[in-house]
Amino acid sequence: DAKTTQPTSMDCAEGRAANLPCNHSTISGNEYVYWYRQIHSQGPQYIIHGLKNNETNEMASLIITEDRKSSTLILPHATLRDTAVYYCIVRVGGGADGLTFGKGTHLIIQP
Amino acid sequence: ETGVTQTPRHLVMGMTNKKSLKCEQHLGHNAMYWYKQSAKKPLELMFVYNFKEQTENNSVPSRFSPECPNSSHLFLHLHTLQPEDSALYLCASSQVKMGLAGGLADTQYFGPGTRLTVL
């Protein structure tokens, strides 16, 4: 699976959009971009995934650049409960392979 | 609620004890996973079961023994653990399937974890 690079930490004001970047310059054509988050000492929570088109669901939007070398997770109206570590994972998937978690981005929502 | 439950949520055990962690998924998935998360470290994959067959053992010591009696249940049997085995143990499940563009897409859903302390 391709390696990803994320900032260690980010702050965002409550009510504003939180934009979390991820670089994955070695991504291959059949690899998906997945985003998970982990609130302190809980199990990781799936947020969204995409292949090449932008995706939106009830939690977030995922913007993938045309060359697929980077992506941005957008939480449109951040709340205090969005404070968590956010993980960007690139993988082919589907073959019962484990997820490779890096250190992720610690997003802190400020009141 | 993700549809994956784990029991117990907290466990304290001595080094000579034998205990088991249980995971159950209510999602109809065909693959299940055990992960370990030690303090201030990323999650590490331990075991993978696909259609009840173990397909991956990520160099885990033999004092951890997984069991998958059916596609909905996964156990992790623990014996003669060490204090450094204290960690959050997470179970996940997914449905193996084909996706777009010839690639494969699946989503793993995690349980809440078992916080294990070995004294």
Image (cartoon, grey):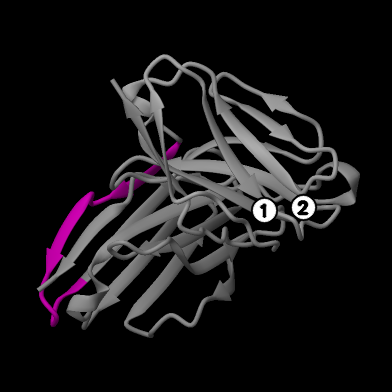
Percent from the top left, x then y, of residue B26?
48, 38
Going from the N terminus, do you reach mark 1 or mark 2 first?
2
* Disc 2: CA contacts within 10 A as few (<14), some (14-19) or many (>=20): many
Name the chain under label 1. A
Percent from the top left, x then y, of residue B12?
12, 63
Percent from the top left, x then y, of residue B87?
27, 64
Residue A85 colored in magenta in the image: no
The magenta stretch is B3-18
- Decide: marks 1, 2 in contact (CB < 8 A)? yes
Determine the image quadrant of residue A28: bottom right
Residue at (41% x, 48% y) in the render: B24
Q: Amino acid at mark 2?
A: Glu
Q: Which residue is mark 1?
A: A90
Q: Amino acid at mark 1?
A: Val
Q: Which residue is mark 2?
A: A31
What's the distance in space between the residues labelled 1 and 2, CA to CA? Answer: 6 Å
Is residue B106 visible in the rendered structure shown here?
no
Is residue B113 visible in the rendered structure shown here?
yes
